[in-house]
Image (cartoon, rainbow, N blue to C red):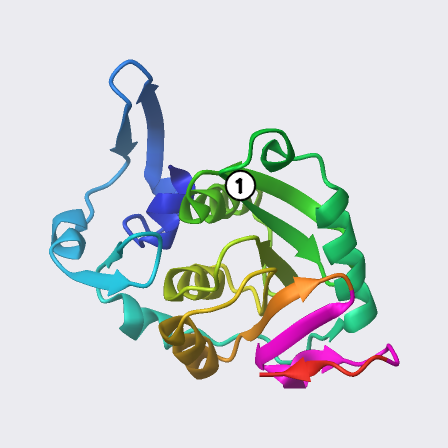
Amino acid sequence: MLGYLRNQRLVDSIDDISSVQVDWETDSAAVVLSRKTNIDDKIGKRTVTSGCGQGTMFGNLMEEVEQIVLRQDVSLKDEDLFVLIEKVRKHETIYKQAGAVHGCALATTGGEILMFVEDVGRHNAVDAIAGFMWLDGIDGSDKVFYTTGRLTSEMVIKCAQMRIPFLVSRSGLTQMGHSIAKRIGITMLGRASGRHYLAFTGRERLVRSSQQPAAVA
């Protein structure tokens, strides 16, 4: 819930939230704010994304996203990327037991997994991580975001909102996701498995430390 409010820009600061009450019987949540906000105006403006099914994000989203400046003084060694890929592969997951879920992870550029969340919808998993980052005041500007799902425009936008410069997936991408990542300047890597990956955008942040050539898409 907190990550959704943050990524949709429905609430500007976590300090504006007085309480969150969840009613599991009705599958609903009530959020009480400490001050008046313009949520109605934001909900009235919608952007359709290439997310699960047909994603929707509110407000003047693209105008805000394109103002985001990501750090250029951070880098990712491919050897550390391979470490992360292997750790995700070995991570105990619901997917291994039941399937039918997506996993998302927040990691350091050294390959350490800081948090891992699974959900039927990858957008829910990324929102959950965004919420934890918001609560704990975690800076995303030197982090890596990993997802098992496709690199859609929605995933790219949410990664940018968290100020994360590296977005990695074992899957492919959408044309809209690629276009936005290129405009924002995110380093987007797909088909990441074993010691292989495709570099779609932001190759200038990658440091080649292995002898195996990286594929460029």
Please, is residue 9 above or below residue 64 in the view?
Answer: above
Q: Residue at x 22, y 63 (%)?
A: 47
SS under mark 1 = helix
Q: Quadrant of residue 50?
A: bottom left
Please, is residue 115 above or below residue 18 in the view?
Answer: below
Q: Position of residue 60 (x, y in %)?
A: 22, 67
Label 1: which residue? 132
Q: Quadrant of residue 199?
A: bottom right
Q: Please state, as top left, top right, bottom left or bottom right, where the C terminus lies in the image.
A: bottom right
Q: Residue at x 49, y 61 (%)?
A: 159
Q: Please state, as top left, top right, bottom left or bottom right, where the N terminus lies in the image.
A: top left
Q: Determine whether, in the image, residue 147 is placed left or right of residue 213.
A: left
- Residue 32 visible? The answer is yes
Q: Position of residue 141 (x, y in %)?
A: 60, 65
User: Quick one: 124 or 141, which is closer to the camera?
Assistant: 124
Q: Quadrant of residue 35?
A: top left
Q: Position of residue 145 (x, y in %)?
A: 59, 58
Bounds of the magenta segment: 195-211
Q: Determine whether, in the image, residue 88 is placed left or right of residue 139.
A: right
Q: Position of residue 148 (x, y in %)?
A: 56, 53
Q: Amino acid at mark 1?
A: Phe
- Residue 142 visible? The answer is no
User: Quick one: 194 or 17, which is closer to the camera?
Assistant: 194
**Magenta stretch: residue 102 in it?**
no
User: Quick one: 171 or 110, which is closer to the camera?
Assistant: 171
Q: Determine whether, in the image, residue 40 is placed left or right of residue 197.
A: left
* Numbered circles on residues, count: 1
Q: Determine whether, in the image, residue 129 is placed left or right of residue 206.
A: left
Seen from this angle, which residue lies furthest top? 25
Please, is residue 20 above or below residue 159 in the view?
Answer: above
